[in-house]
Amino acid sequence: MASILTNLFDGVAYGMLLFVLACGLAVTLGLMNFVNLAHGAFAMAGGYICAVLVNNSGWPFFAALPLAFVASAAIGVALERTLYRHLYTRSHLDQVLFSIGLVFMSVAAVDYIMGSSRIFIKLPAALEGQLSLFGVGIGRYRLMIVVICGLLTLALQLILAKTRFGSRLRAAVDDPRAAIGLGINVPQVFAFTFAFGSGLAGLGGALSAEILGLDPYFPLKFMIYFLIVVTVGGSSSITGPFLASLLLGIADVAGKYYVPKMGPFVIYTVMIVILLWRPNGLFGRTAAR
Amino acid sequence: MTALSDVSTHAKAGARWRVSEVAFWVLTLACAFLFPSRYLIMTDIVRLALFALSLDLILGYAGVVSLGHAAFFGVGAYSAGLLALHGIINEPVIALVVAGLVAAVLGFLTSFLVIRGVDLTRLMVTLGIALLLEALAERFSNITGGTDGLQGIEMQPILGLFAFDMFGKTGLFYSLIVLFILFLLARRVVHSPFGLSLRAIRNNPLRAAAIGMPVNRRLIAIYTLAAFYAGIAGALFTQTTALASLDVFAFERSADLMLVLVIGGTGYLYGGLIGAVVFKMLQELFQSITPQYWLFWIGLVLVVIVLVGRERIHRWVLFVPNLVIRQFAGRKAVVAVPERDAP
Amino acid sequence: MYNRRKMLLWAATTVSVAGFCAMPASAQETVKIGLIVPMTGGQASTGKQIDNAVKLYMQQKGDTVAGKKIEVILKDDAAVPDNTKRLAQELIVNDKVNFIAGFGVTPAALAAAPLATQAKIPEVVMAAGTSIITERSPYIVRTSFTLAQSSTIIGDWAIKNGIKKVATLTSDYAPGNDALTFFKQHFTAGGGEVVEEVKVPLANPDFAPFLQRMKDAKPDAMFVFVPAGQGGNFMKQYAERGLDKSGIKVIGPGDVMDDDLLNNMGDAALGAVTAHLYSAAHPSQMNKDFVAAYKKAFGNRPGFMAVSGYDGMHLIYEALKKTGGDTNGDKLVEAMKGMKWESPRGPISIDPETRDIVQNIYIRKVEKVDGELYNVEFATFEAVKDSGKTKK
């Protein structure tokens, strides 16, 4: 029983992590209809920035996390203003070509600067080890992930649904021309959204170094996972990707625990079945065209 | 009546062989004779070109995107490998066709999964199928050799006459002939009424269905054909390298393929061939300059291609030939026309 | 539209002609070594260590041997066997190399084996560790290790040190399966019991569920083999789950505790016992000099891949000295057979029968030395041969 709950918890933590990593992609792909395969590169940037700050400059881990967010967001907005915005109207194939190109460049650049070995972030002692709650083993680090990601999800949902910015964004996405006519500064809204999504990815990258491993090939290795989350979840809201991430996380952990021999089959089979059942994703309204 | 004759004239005009096409093939053949020290890389290019041709059939003509085309490549590769390894079919040409048919069967079966859904769903379903197959091949390592791949494949001479040599000469000419034959077939197919109907489906599936086209049946047919092509490409891979390992299914293979085709341009059959030449040459060039960081430069080229725009690059590429034409032929220069992108 | 495309066809063919012209083949009176290692992709760190070590060796020993100039041609195969094969073939046919060397993974080494046989040139394997490799061609010589060497030793050691029940966690690919088989052979023969056996997919991001399984099996120790690189994540999650506190020790072949990464793993790695061929803390003067030189040149610690690359170059140099610069493949391989020398890892030799390496295997424990983590050797099994060869 205890190990079932521990597994469930691990699955949730893993899923939450995937969500933070992928939700920026859900926004660019679902809302802005831009295929940004370079999303993982922003996550990697965040991870490496955090690692350098903590390991080399001696920053405390919790101070480096927000900075990972800010730095990735800054990189995101810089690239959006200079490169990405020219490509919003281009075909998906062009976007794929472009963003894969960016991934290749980022991989080689990080390899050049930081070396090709995996790096780790030195964690404060408070985050190491496991708590025992009613006999259920709960990793402290994973608990922190669940808390941070849970809060973020809540905040995100509130921002999108309740704030003025949220309604502007939704308007800009539904019909950019009408939105401009109503005086909404659409490019600004897009730039801000893009930056926020990149920032979240950066934060996710910093958090995932411990669990997924951080090396220069991170964006290529996890691109598939991000895409799975977004397609399975559907991209019309962030609830979809959120639930999809949890499902994926739990299915993966449970699959590996109970049928370790079939591990890799579980995720892909689940994905194919869901996509056959609901081609637009679990909560898709009009997934990316 | 006029509309019908218009269509047939158009189709016939499209199907006519052009001087440039003939020149392309003559030059390709010339390359094969001129650079005996580069047989291997050329074989690699020819294989990739055939593989890209296969993706062009579904992406360029039917508008079906796929990130898992390596599934068929892999099945073809393993089929050819197993046939040769266990001596079931020793004659490479027959084995090649059989391997292609195996891939075609898989293509037919999976096509039902693929024709549903929108682009993104298709991307992920095809990708999922390829990854599942990779996992299966790893699991049944007693058949496939697992991560080590199939070892000890020995190829018999083609038609009992031409043995595969170490320099890759036989392999290259064999691959070239296969590519040419399959290219002719593809050319015939896309200029047939069937090919035209596919283009109608690509441009607007709803309208195509409304005028009475069996959209799904057509898509299944072309998907199966493309799988056959990819299977042949995979079988060529195994036969010319005497290897088959898990990476034939890898995501990277499908993704590279997509890049190749997008670089070359979709929907005119030569895109895959040109893309394969350009991509491999760039890779070879950068790899020989910097074996460690070549990925960066490839990435930069891709980014530049998109930012500058393929049309503009095509125009620049054509600048010199245009100049020549103007000078000598006195003809009006070739004007770049914006390419119609696949959806 | 067709006009433009027609022109494109012309252009493409012209470019390709020009391109092939620009890459000429050349053959000079030097001894050429084709070094094929993964420099990109998941195995890139292996390739880099080997490349570094080769450069270091040539820096120290000069680039002329027996009157011949040594030239190394580095190629990246990204650990994909068909690349390896093509590159090896081109190196042999076009560049006329006298040695092919490197090979990060087993499939790559195997793919090149028939070429070495056909071309009659030595293939020096500097990384890949499956036993069968050297049996695939009479021209293959190995300077790295085989998994059987370290796995059988750790099995024997575990029995002697009162470990009765072991759970195994190995990556599901040839080296992982090799490690598991040889460990089980020796461990169960000595009366030990394997209570849980988990094979982890090679591309595996998260060890949590597997570790939970290990924990629930309650063994005395867990035998671990994951490819170099994943070791760090594994150890961190091992500690996170409190397996260290519940008294489950980590044992295994030393790949998990690669010196390359060890120091970044944090205190989680403390106390892990592994059997391996090399530790950067090996207490010989030669090794101290080697580590210092490597650190000075490349800024980090050499791992076992680096030392294998270093020894591989040494083997090539010495073989050339012995033949007096003769590059006949048969003579070179003959010269390599039975060669003995002192390496940074300790005394090693090439088995004249199998052309595989014979070396000491050390049992090491991760400890803190001067604030850094090191594998400190505390027991030595001398001159271990590869026991994984096909029984004749």
Image (tube, helix red, strand yellow):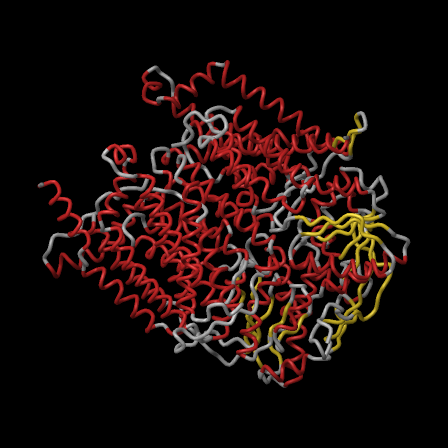
Picture quadrant where residue C354 is located = bottom right
Q: Is A6 situated left or right of B177 in this image?
A: right
Q: Most extreme residue toward the front, as rendered?
A: B88
Report if residue C370 is visible in the image. Answer: no
Which percent across, then down, holds residue A130?
78, 33
Nearest to the observer: residue B3 or residue A9: B3
| Rendered position, C342 above or below A59 | below
Which percent across, then down, holds residue B266?
31, 48
Which percent across, then down, holds residue C183?
78, 59
Nearest to the observer: residue A282 or residue B276: A282
Q: Residue at x 26, y 44 (%)?
A: B339
Nearest to the observer: residue A286 or residue C287: A286
Q: Residue at x 63, y 71 (%)?
A: C124
Report if residue C270 is visible in the image. Answer: yes
Q: Is C363 situated left or right of C69 in this image?
A: right
Quadrant, the C terminus of chain C: bottom right
Q: Residue at x 48, y 74 (%)?
A: C95
Which percent across, then down, holds residue C325?
60, 84
Q: Residue at x 14, y 47 (%)?
A: B8
Picture quadrant where residue B342 is located = top left
